[in-house]
């Protein structure tokens, strides 16, 4: 059985050290539950740490350490997983199982980085057309890292701004009586003609058609 950990610190300079610690922590927790020292089948690390290989062998009690894994992980033998726990308490297990089910039912989903990015983007709009540096600061990452993360999602900063502008223009045309000139100034277009060209590119027709269709 493989246990992997996906944390929010991938872009931190200390991530290599965090990733190195995770399998060791999981190994210690598993050994505590089993009541004996466990030898993992395999340990995966996202990148090669500065730690000497001999120290890793002593740390994980295995020479099967591989790099370039998607996430820090550790794999245990099936026999270790199926072995009875020496301090098992069926009554306590039932209580914890019920608590876990109730907690899961009431839990809110954890927002991924894309959710946080869009929230930061929408928040930045209140101060005017958002800038890459501004949004990156809100996410506590560098502009270069933000651009890389967007590329990993098959997008780009320019494409994100284009879609944001389209959503704002669409909403203002449908839900307000603002003139095209006012909408252009509010959204950040250089002039009404630039806005009209963008609307034709997005929809194939002018702003009057969108406004006439009303709220969605």
Image: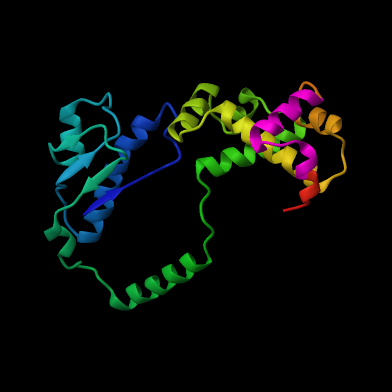
- Residue at 61%, 28% in the rendered image: 137
Residue 102 picture location, percent across and down: 47, 71
Please tell me whether residue 37 is drawn above or below residue 10 in the rendered image. Answer: below
Q: Is residue 176 left or right of residue 171?
A: right
Image quadrant of residue 89? Answer: bottom left
The residue closer to the viewer here, 174 or 44, is: 174
- Residue at 57%, 27% in the rendered image: 157
Report the magenta residues as a range: 192-210
- Residue at 54%, 59% in the rendered image: 108
Image quadrant of residue 185? Answer: top right
Q: Quadrant of the N terminus?
A: bottom left
Query: Which residue is at the far bottom?
Result: 91
- Residue at 76%, 31% in the rendered image: 187
The residue closer to the viewer here, 114 or 26, is: 114
The residue closer to the viewer here, 47 or 214, is: 214
Residue 115 picture location, percent across and down: 56, 44
Mark yes or no: residue 83 visible: yes
Q: Is residue 159 left or right of residue 29?
A: right
Residue 150 picture location, percent across and down: 50, 31
Please tell me whether residue 155 is drawn above or below residue 174 in the rendered image. Answer: above
Was residue 49 drawn as part of the magenta stretch in this picture? Answer: no
Was residue 193 drawn as part of the magenta stretch in this picture? Answer: yes
Mark yes or no: residue 188 visible: no
Q: Is residue 156 left or right of residue 32?
A: right
Residue 113 picture location, percent across and down: 51, 40
The residue closer to the viewer here, 91 or 1, is: 1
């Amino acid at each position: 059985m493989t246990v992997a950990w996906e944390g929010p610190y991938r872009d931190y300079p200390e991530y290599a050290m965090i990733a190195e610690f995770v399998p060791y922590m999981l190994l210690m927790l598993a050994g505590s539950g089993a009541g004996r020292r466990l030898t993992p089948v395999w340990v995966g690390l996202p990148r090669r740490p500065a730690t000497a290989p001999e120290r890793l062998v002593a740390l994980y009690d295995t020479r099967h350490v591989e790099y370039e894994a998607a996430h820090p992980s550790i794999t245990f033998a099936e026999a270790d997983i199926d072995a009875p726990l020496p301090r098992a308490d069926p009554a306590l297990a039932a209580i914890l199982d019920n608590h876990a089910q109730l907690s899961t039912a009431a839990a809110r989903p954890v927002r991924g980085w894309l959710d946080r990015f869009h929230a930061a983007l929408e928040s930045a709009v209140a101060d005017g057309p958002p800038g890459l540096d501004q949004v990156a600061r809100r996410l506590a990452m560098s502009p270069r890292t933000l651009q890389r993360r967007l590329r990993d999602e098959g997008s780009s900063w320019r494409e994100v701004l284009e879609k944001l502008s389209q959503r704002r223009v669409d909403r203002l045309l449908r839900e307000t009586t603002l003139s095209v000139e006012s909408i252009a100034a509010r959204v950040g277009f250089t002039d009404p003609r630039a806005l009209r060209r963008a609307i034709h590119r997005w929809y194939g027709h002018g702003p009057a058609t969108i406004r006439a269709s009303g709220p969605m």
